[in-house]
Image (cartoon, rainbow, N blue to C red):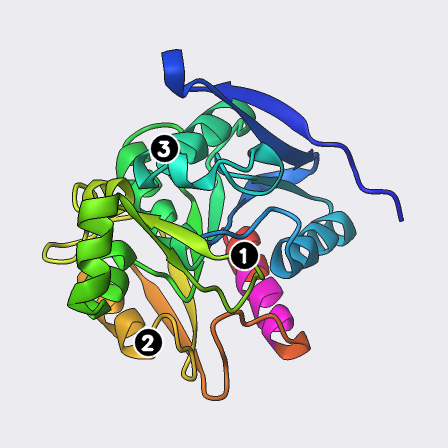
Amino acid sequence: MERDAPQWLEVGDGAERRRIAYLSQEGAGAPVVWLGGFCSDMRATKANALAQWATETGRAFLRFDYAGHGESGSDFGRWTLSHWLEDALAVVTARCGQRPILVGSSMGGWIALLAARRLLGTPLAPAGMVLIAPAVDFTEELMWAQMPEAIRQTILTEGAWLRPSEYSPEPTPITRALIEDGRKLLMFGGEIRTGCPVHILQGMRDPDVPWRHALRLVEHLSGDPVVLTLVKDGDHRLSGADDIRRLQAAVAGLATAP
């Protein structure tokens, strides 16, 4: 089956000007916007499953690749969380004509919450959010705090450490810029406000984002209606057939809510 060709959006200024690839499906209702994970891309399993759901139900669906991800370029180590948040906000602003439903996976969950904070009080404030294994503050909590001192010193002195990946044959550069930029965007420690209903899907056998991390997020979302679904045998990806059905049902529940 031939893949749909992406459209392109220019983001940033000067030396940080970049082209972001995105795919947009027309449809009714609040547009569903997919925010992928760290090193993932907009054609991954869960994104494709939501695209199929959107086609079958006539819903608007939007997905994109952050700078350095997928079809938006290969220079991954050049970019940080602030750039990827800027990419997300640019795509939402350019392509959403009404309040979106943000669906964030892993790092995309953190970016969805950061985007909601920026959009709160505007015509594009999220109408709902579905977060899959949301990796809030992961650069500090799930990377830096867990790293041996030798790896920290490599990052500080050499500017990057090449981390072996379980999901790719190529190692992932963890840069000093990524860690330091992440510290500017930390959310734990104060109330996190989205202004909309939130549904969290979390595997209890997730080796990357522990399920207690999701419980901590629920505690910080003290002013929003939150549903937390814990999948007892679920891993980080939550891409099995049952997981996909849970995801589609969670998005459908928000998309059809009054």
- The local crowd at label 3, few if under 14, some if 14 to 19, many if 20 or more residues have their Cα within 10 Å, is some
Q: In the image, which is nearer the foreground, mark 1 or mark 2?
A: 1
Residue at image x 56%, y 33%? 73
Q: Earlier in the sequence, mark 1 or mark 3?
A: 3
Nearer to me, 56 or 52? 52
Q: Position of residue 241 (x, y in %)?
A: 68, 76
Residue found farthest to the bottom = 232
Q: Dots 1 and 3: beta carbons under 8 Å?
A: no
Q: Which residue is mark 3?
A: 83
Nearer to me, 200 or 257? 200
Whether residue 246 appears in magenta in the rendering, the answer is yes
Instruction: Name the secondary structure under disc 2.
Output: loop
Give the distance between the C-alpha atoms of the residues marked 1 and 3, in whole angstroms.
Answer: 22 Å
Residue found farthest to the top = 14
Q: Position of residue 161 (x, y in %)?
A: 33, 54
Rendered image quadrant of residue 199: bottom left
Magenta stretch, overall SS: helix
Q: Is residue 193 visible?
A: yes
Q: Amino acid at mark 1?
A: Glu
Q: Earlier in the sequence, mark 3 or mark 2?
A: 3
Instruction: Name the secondary structure under disc 1.
Output: loop
Give the distance between the C-alpha atoms of the residues marked 3 and 2, in whole angstroms.
Answer: 26 Å
Q: Position of residue 254 (x, y in %)?
A: 50, 56
Q: Amino acid at mark 2?
A: Pro
Q: Which residue is mark 2?
A: 210
Residue at image x 29%, y 44%? 178
Which mark, by number, is residue 170? 1
What residue range appears in magenta? 243-251
Whether residue 110 appears in magenta in the rendering, the answer is no
Give the distance between the C-alpha atoms of the residues marked 1 and 2, in whole angstroms.
Answer: 24 Å
Above/below status of 212 relative to 247 = below
